[in-house]
Image (tube, rainbow, N blue to C red):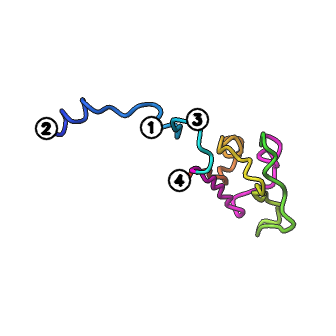
């Protein structure tokens, strides 16, 4: 019962979950990680088309099914991990993570 009482007294604030710090959003603490399973990809290009930051492009190579697949090309750290690329992928070949 004591553990439950502690939880009730110290709730997690929304700011703890969003990554916001006192001075605003601290982008240096967040690292984006986009994992593309090239063997699941069928080369439709939806992820490339719908990426707001234009961080995806077709690779020079082909997968085992002979489809072009996308590469994550965020050299300027513009990705905000919105995961729109993963949501648009009909094959569920993309995973997006935020890492501290």
Q: Residue 100, percent across and down?
A: 53, 53
Residue located at (72% from left, 52% from top): 77
Element marked by disc 3: strand
Residue at 47 percent across and 33 percent down: it is 15
Q: Nearer the viewer, mark 3 or mark 2?
A: 3
Q: Position of residue 34 (x, y in %)?
A: 66, 55
| Disc sitting over residue 35 in the figure | none
Q: Are marks 4 and 3 in contact (CB under 8 Å)?
A: no
Q: Position of residue 21 (x, y in %)?
A: 52, 38
Looking at the rendered structure, the secondary structure element under dot 1 is: helix
Residues in magenta?
29-50
- Residue at image mark 4: 100
Q: Residues within 10 Å of mark 1 (few under 14, many from 20)?
A: few
* Residue drawn where x is 67% and y is 46% of the image: 86
Dots 4 and 1: beta carbons under 8 Å?
no
**Disc sitting over residue 24 in the figure:** 3
Identify whether 94 is placed above or below 2. Answer: below
Q: From the image, state whether disc 2 or disc 1 is nearer to you.
A: 1
Viewer-closest of 45 and 17: 17
């Amino acid at each position: 019962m004591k553990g439950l009482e502690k939880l009730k007294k110290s709730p997690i604030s929304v700011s703890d979950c969003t990554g916001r710090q006192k001075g605003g959003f601290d982008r240096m603490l967040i690292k984006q990680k986009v994992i593309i399973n090239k063997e699941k990809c069928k080369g439709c290009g939806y992820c490339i088309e719908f990426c707001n930051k234009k961080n995806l492009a077709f690779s020079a190579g082909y997968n085992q099914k002979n489809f072009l697949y996308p590469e994550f090309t965020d050299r300027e750290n513009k990705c905000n991990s919105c995961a729109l690329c993963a949501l648009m992928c009909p094959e569920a070949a993309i995973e997006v993570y935020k890492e501290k």
